[in-house]
Structures are given as C-alpha cells and as structure tokens.
Image (cartoon, helix red, strand yellow):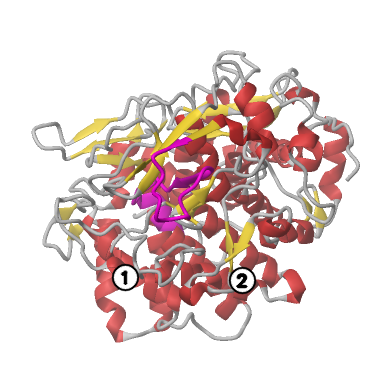
Amino acid sequence: MKKTILSSVIIASCLSISHADSQYGDMQSIVNFLTADIDKGTGVSYVATAGELKGKLLPLSYYNTERYWGEYVCRLRGNNCKVTDQYNPGDYTLTPIENSPGGELQTERVSVNYGSNIYDSAIWQLALSVAATHGLKGPENKSLFDIANNQNQLLEQGYNGNAPNNPTSGSNRGVTTPNGVFEYNGQSITNPEHAYHFRMITRDWLSNDPFINTKYADYITIKDLPTDNPLYKKGKLTWTDWKPITGENSWAFLIGPLQSAYLQYVKSGAQNAVPLDSVPVQNAIDILHAFSRMQSKIGGVYYAAKGSMQNHGDQPVDPYSVSTENNASLLSGLLILKHILIQGNNSQTQAHLKTIDVMINGGVMPNRKTTEGLLSYFKKYAWDASTKDFHQGGLANKTGEPHWIPSTEPKPVDGNTWTVAVLGQALIDSWHGFGTAYTIWNKMKAWGGYYDDRDQLWGVGYSSIDGNGLDDGNRSGIMSAEWTAGAINMLNVLIAQYSTQKASHPDAKEYIASLQTDLESMEAHINTLRVANYSSVKMFDSVRPKNYDSLVSLNENQQAYLYSSKRYFIPFGWYANPLPSTASTSWALLMNYKYNPFTLGGGYIPNFQPRI
C-alpha cells in the first residue's frame, strides 16, 4: 500500500469521507485483518483444532514477526535475548532458568506470539458483530456473527484452541485449589463454570517462540529435555500466565458477548429479546457467581482472585486490591446483563436481577455479606477530590487497615475515560458539580494527552507519567491507538450528553465546542498509528524501529492499527509494542461506526440519571 506523509491538513480533509471508507480507513480491510488465518500469512486469528472447537476461527491479541524481535527488540540497548530453557520433570514445565538474561524477553515475545487476552477477544467479537450489522462479511463470505460466536464456545469449553488429544473442559478457569490458590474474597469456587477465566490464554500449553526454526534460534539454549516426549524441544515454552482478573472477565463474559448477542438477535429484528438459554447469557449468569463474591464492603470489586501474580515480577497481587477501570467495565457489563434479563421477561431471572441490583446499589449479597455497591465506590472512594479525577484504585477493607487506602500508582488514562463513559455526565455532575465530567477530560488531557510540537492534541498515552502531556512539555511520550479510541468514545459520550443540557446550563455550549475540537483532532490523528501510515509520520521518527516496513507489513487487503507509537514499559506492568493490535483495530472499527461499547446497543444515552 502506498505510503503518504500525513499532515494536519491532509488528515483533517479525511473527516468528510463516508463511514465505509472514513478517517479510520476501509472497514472491510479491517475485518479482513481481524479474521485472517495467521498460519497462512498475515492476520490475527487462527483455526482451532481441539475438541468441540475444531475448525473454529479464534482471535489472538497481536500480529508479530520474528524479525521485529530479532532485529529490533534484541538489539535495543540493555537487552540481551540469550536465554537458557530447562525442563522441570516435577511439573512438566519448560521455562527459562532463573536469572537467564533473556528470560523475560522470551516470555514476552511468546505471550505476544501465541497469546490471546480475553479482553482483546471480547473487543474482536463486538467489532465483528458491529461490522455484521453494516453488511460486512468474513472470509469466504461467512457470517461475522457466526465467527464472533466462536469466542462464546471457547469460553464455554474453557480449554486452549490447539490443545492436543482430549482437552479438559474448564482447564482455563481459576478454580480454587486445595492449597487455597484462587480464593475469591475468602471463599472457594470449585465449579469451573462459576470461576473466573484466566485473562491470557494460549493456543497450546506448549507455546511457540517466534524464533523457532529461524536464524534467531541461536539465542536459545536448551537443557535437560525429556527423552520420552518429542513435543518438548528447542523453541517451545510452557505457558506462564495464570491470572483470573475481574476486568478481563467483565469484558469477556458480559460486554463483548452480550452486546454481540443483542446486535444479532434484537438489532437485526430477528427476535424481541436475546434468548435467555443462549450460550452468552448462560455464560454471563454463571460468572455472576464469582463477581458477586469478589465485592468488598465499600462496593469496589476486587481486582484478582487470591494467588494471582502481578503483571511484572514474581510477587502475588494483594487480594484486597481494587482497580477503578476494572470496576467501570464490570458496572457496564452488569447493566447490559440486567437489561437483557429484563427483556427476556422470565421469572427465573429474578434472583440474578436481585444480585445485580445489590452489586450496583448496595445491600446484602447472596453470600450474606453486605456491600455499599459499585455506585458508592465510584462516588465516595474512587473519586480523588484533590485532583478532580479518579484514582487508579486502592486497597479495600484490608484486615487491620483503614477501610480504604487509595493507590499511589500513576493515574491511568482508561481509569478516567472508561469510568466517565460508563457513569455518564449527568450522574458525575450531580455528584460533584455541573461541568465536572468536562473538567475531568481537560485535566486528563493535560497529563495524559499526546501532542505534536505545535501543541496539537493527537491522542492519549497510558498514564500520568508517560511524558505525553502539556504539564511537563515533554514530547517524547507515547501514543496508544487503543487508549486514544477509548478517549474518543468518552468525548462522543460527553458531547451527546451535554447537548441535552444546553437549555438549562449556558456553559454546556462552550463545553461541547471544546470537546468537539479535541474529538476531531484525535479522530484525525489516530490514523497516524495505522500500519500503512506509521513509517511516514515525522513525529515518530525518533522512536520508530528502523526499516519498520521490512519488520512488520500486512497484505494489501488488510488494515490494522498499532498498539502504541513505540516500545515502552507501561507503569502498570507490561510492554507496549508498535505491533498490529486486535484491541486497537477493533476499537477503531467501533469508533468508525460510533458504537459505545458501554451501553446496550452502542448509543450515548446515559446509563444513569441523577437521583432527585
């Protein structure tokens, strides 16, 4: 695809193009990328071979190449990709030996190459369903609804897509073990259907290093391989990510599948309601068991089951940790499930609706514990009155401590963009004064926005310490396509909701004009992180891998968005890479069609109205 140098003038001119081929690009090309079999070339999906999943197309989180790792990451200053992997007969694992210099880099590239985050998969699922409502098709003219539903089957079966022999149902669920690992707020869950799904899953437990069978395989040394199992060999690594996390499960079981089902059954006019006996609804009802048990007394739902490890390092997550962004996702998902259950009009759903109501508004849970509810958490605890935005999270109801200890971690961009989109302008402004939701954006773009050398807003990064914003004048920061799309969604929500306030609040018109300016700028400049444009953008010259187009390229009929503008260690514990991303590309498609994932049906009607 021909590259063109992007300027603000050129990009701005794209704003008048139709939704079929808009500033976000051609939507069918995006669908082509999302549904192409990576084993046959470029793309971000693969064909399952295991059990009931055989023949189904399933998503990965990234498209990557061995050259990106071998010729770029391995050569970065301070990096050493030499690694020694060792077989452990005690637990049948093949992993880097302790203190192996390239161990973390190998684990990272294997996770990127072979892994699928269930949040990414949920966005993939929703993007395909939205595309289906606009008449787009999958490979060989297949229904995108049918392809999207494959993810429901994966979650229901609970095993890896390429698992060998007879896969065990529920093996990817974080059930409580006899020694207490994966306890849910002090309670055991032994039924896999009721437990969280692990947030990152792999195609097969023995995963492929991108360096396998390439010239970069010399980075790898192997020792103590078993003599009786030929599957263990150089270039293989056993999966190491076992984290049952609230936020990812909220997207995977609630937002992605339920929104998709609503589009397929109701928006299409096929039925008046989503069938309550459908796989996505039954999956959602089952996982409600875990969500309700993970709720704290102050209302925030805990981040991870006990025994989960942190994103970086070898320390476990504090089981009393609460993430604001995770709770925003869960609140949205619960509202979506609530509306679907009400539409189904079945007396058997009343107990589930009661659980949802208590989780949102407070009361006595099914386990007889009390909670203030999610809305109380956002109003009283997540809110940072000193900075007029939302905390990253904190520790809730930890024994022997104050009932709430706000986190000292950097401010997260999505902890604000997603939270505002879910709670809505009317509710936030009723809590903290008219214009608060608008102020949150203005404050956040100052510390989290990504600007060019003329102080024009292009998008956002990840946190308050990324070196992006006007606060410190640093232009060496990072821009994320995925998180910028989340900011675009927030502004669409605020513009729509402040537009209903113009008659009673004269300042609303000024807010809307300012928000519209920022929206148009971000909608234009998110295009700089499209794969076809990235290597031509002058702003990224100092951070882009040299000869990028020779390291990463796609087929001409495919289009994708990168996860980030450069390789960067995000302060929340993982590396961003300028690689084609399932989440970024799927979010771009949703924003093209102005689909808000946090409200059933994708509109901008507030989820809440302030109580009088």
Q: Name the residue under label 1.
A: 286
The amino acid type found where label 2 is placed reads: Ile
The percent coordinates of residue 88 (x first, y second) are: 32, 43
Quick check: can you spot residue 470? yes
The residue that appears at 68% across and 76% down in the rendered structure is: 143
Q: Is mark 1 on a helix, strand or loop?
A: helix
Question: Magenta: predominant secondary structure element?
Answer: loop
Q: Is residue 514 left or right of residue 601?
A: right
The percent coordinates of residue 99 (x first, y second) are: 38, 24
Quick check: can you spot residue 566? no
Q: Residues within 10 Å of mark 2 (few under 14, many from 20)?
A: many
Assign the C terminus to one quadrant of the image: bottom left
* Residue span colored magenta: 222-251
Sequence-first tag of 1 and 2: 2
Q: In front: mark 1 or mark 2?
A: 2
The percent coordinates of residue 268 (x first, y second) are: 63, 79
Q: Mark 2 points at which residue?
A: 147
The amino acid type found where label 1 is placed reads: Asp
Judging depth in this view, the residue of 81 and 593 nearest the camera is 81
Judging depth in this view, the residue of 416 and 319 nearest the camera is 319
The residue that appears at 77% across and 43% down in the rendered structure is: 553
